[in-house]
Image: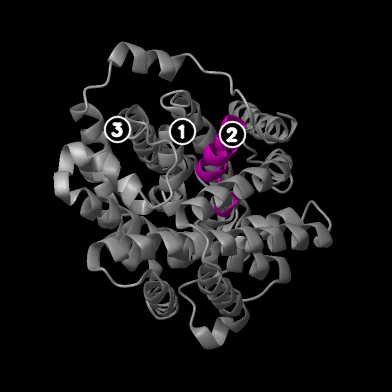
Amino acid sequence: MKPSNPRNPIARFLRKLGPGVITGAADDDPSGIATYSVAGAQQGTALLWTALITWPLMGAVQMMCARIGMVTGRGLAATLRMKFPKWLVVAASFALFVANTINIGADLSGMADSAQMLAGINSHWMVPLFGLAITAASIWCRYTEIARILKWLALALFAYIVTGVIVHPPWPRVLWSTFIPTWPNGHEMWSTLVAILGTTISPYLFFWQSSNEVEEDKAKGRKKLAERRGATPEEIADRKVDVATGTFASNIVMYFIILTTAYTLHKNGVTQIETSRQAAEALRPLAGKFAAFLFATGVIGTGLLAIPTLAGSAAYAFAETFSWRQGLDENLPRARAFYAVFVAAMGIGIALDFLNISPIKALYWTAIINGLLAPPLLLGILIVACDRSIMQRQPSSMLSRVVVGISTALMFGAAIGMFVF
């Protein structure tokens, strides 16, 4: 018997929130924060318009991945195997593993750099500490319980919204930059555009969203594939609200990070960000001497939320490709291969820190890698989502296909533009 819907509209709204909000929150990871900070510092408000278009694009892509998981009862990699040769899916899973591992290393470095601002402890000590703590918690604790706590830490990033108002930007000029796109001029601006698209429409989110839909069904007692196939109109409608909320929150934070860094750092001639402390300076008009604390808290919170998502999505991709037992709520002895991929991604990510690469540069370049990997994956997702047989006669709507098609074309175009210009 289904529980009755609460009469309070706020309670009804909160009941609809789930994987979409967690995925949206994970999208504003340290890599995203660094990318948006670099965009604002280097380009000023020239790329503010990207936040306006990435919300519907990101929302459509995420909802398409959610629908695939909901109606097929399988994760994305398992679904792609039904349409494409196994070797191609293996190659995609390996590419995802490589991109995610580099992203994990960069995120850990960014978190450690922020922790050094707070506690003065050498960042090289903090990287393995964070990495081991996240790995242990992901294996022995329920991820949804941890994520519920960590999302509150990520709320520190909303300080950028307040700061964006406090610095009193010339709003007519800001609105012009928001609604009138500036055509990218030169390799640097094209690279930044690819990085923005790559960190907002990230490949790891595709796999995470669809796999989490399967986990949600399993949590409801639908253990067998036949029980998970298909989704009711109400379930799909609820997930649309969930995804729209998560992606909106993610993109509004993105918008104000670019705006704030444009009118604090860029305006004062700080166009090259090398450290997290420089990025934290953007919050000084609001937080004063506490700017570093506020920024570091947000980076650490989003990193703790995003890194299990990165390692988990790679593990899900391999597990679904090779039909292994999977799930972050599974016991270690029952899902050894799944956790082996998870631990390998974390271990290599920790090791990458000792290459002495600038955390901000590493975070920025992982976004570019994701921007290059996403377009071919989107094409595969689009093909699967249109297949009525695979999608249990519940394919994505024509509007969704058009928007995801635009996302795919835009990301292909930005990647080509980066190399051509």
Residue at image location 51% in from the left, 51% down from the top: 361
Q: Does the magenta stretch include residue 274?
A: no
Outermost residue to the front: 269
Q: How far apart are marks 1 and 2 (CA)?
A: 9 Å
Tell me where the magenta segment starts and ends, as one range. 188-204
| Residue 384 x %, y % | 71, 44
Outermost residue to the bottom: 333
Q: Distance between the residues labelled 1 and 3?
A: 12 Å
Q: Earlier in the sequence, mark 1 or mark 2?
A: 1
The amino acid on which the numbered mark 2 sits, given as a three-letter code, is Glu
Residue at image location 46% in from the left, 33% down from the top: 42
The amino acid on which the numbered mark 1 sits, given as a three-letter code, is Gln
Nearest the camera: 413 or 219?
413
Q: Mark 2 points at which residue?
A: 188
Q: Which of marks 3 and 2 is nearer the N terminus?
A: 2
The amino acid on which the numbered mark 3 sits, given as a three-letter code, is Thr
| Residue 357 x %, y % | 53, 61
State the mark number for residue 264: 3
Q: How crowded is mark 1: few (under 14 residues within 10 Å), some or many (20 or more)?
A: many
Q: Name the residue under label 1.
A: 42
